[in-house]
Amino acid sequence: MARTLLLDLDKTLINVEDHTDYCAAVEAARSHLGRIPDAPDVPDTSWGRCTKVAMDVLVTLSGRPEWEEVSSLFEDFEARGAERAEAMPGLHDFLRAIAGRPRAIVTLCGPRSANRVCERHDVEVDAIVTRSPEARIKPAPDQVQQALAALNAQPESSVMIGDSAWDEGAARAAGVAFIGLTNGKPTRQFSADCPLASNLTEAIPLILEP
């Protein structure tokens, strides 16, 4: 049986971050909240500083009424970035290689931007799990568990690929195997025993192992 594939979106399949003004998004959140909450205890990443602050804010606000307001603020910026987002190297070879396998996107992006990016770049999946007020975002396991439920898949027969320690943390917490995508950069953010690929082309034989 083909393994279920769980795919991060930003800088795994499509580069959204570099086209999204997360610094302006953080300032909008600061204005709305009055202050930026203290950073939570979460893994470090290779994201830009403002991107990390934005995602930290969403983790900290989880379960609070302000979460939806701030998420919506951020998505206004992400939606503009989605119109300029670019495919990561090897994307379409990767998509051809996984055709026919059950697959879902698990992303920190909001629903408008995630759906628009997939539409623009012809990324077809069986489910897209975006951030939402109903579940804690990565690195908590909730989004991965939502994707598994949407695909009627079991953790032990699934594998996730992502470019950050938050992806790895979410996958491992949900009992799902993980492959780290380095995008050609030296990195120490992944676990020592984590299989690594520098790009999507290199990831194909890893993610399709039985």
Image: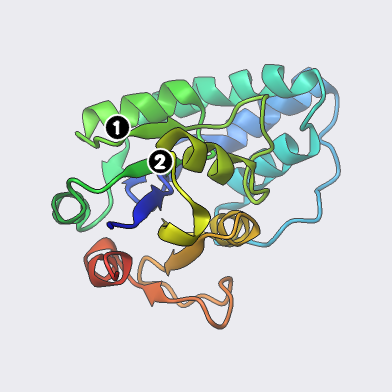
The answer to whether residue 16 shows anywhere in this view is no
Residue wearing tag 2: 105
Give how far apart the Cα atoms at labels 2 and 1 are.
Answer: 10 Å
Residue wearing tag 1: 118
- Tell me the SS state at disc 2: strand
Q: Position of residue 94 (x, y in %)?
A: 20, 55
Q: Position of residue 61 (x, y in %)?
A: 79, 32
Q: In the rendered view, would you say 145 is above or below 155?
A: above
Quadrant occupied by the N terminus: bottom left
Contact between labelled residues 1 and 2, with CB atoms less than 8 Å apart:
yes
Question: Count of labels shown?
Answer: 2
| Residue nearest the observer in this picture, 9 or 206 | 206
Q: Position of residue 68 (x, y in %)?
A: 69, 19
- Tell me the SS state at disc 1: helix
| Three-letter residue code for mark 2 | Ile
The reply, left or right, for residue 27 in relation to residue 98 is right
Nearer the observer: mark 2 or 1; the answer is 2
How many C-alpha atoms fall within 10 Å of the one at disc 2: few (<14), some, or many (≥20)?
many
User: In percent of the image, x 70 and y 16: which residue is there?
Assistant: 69
How many C-alpha atoms fall within 10 Å of the one at disc 1: few (<14), some, or many (≥20)?
some
Q: Position of residue 32 (x, y in %)?
A: 77, 18
| Three-letter residue code for mark 1 | Cys
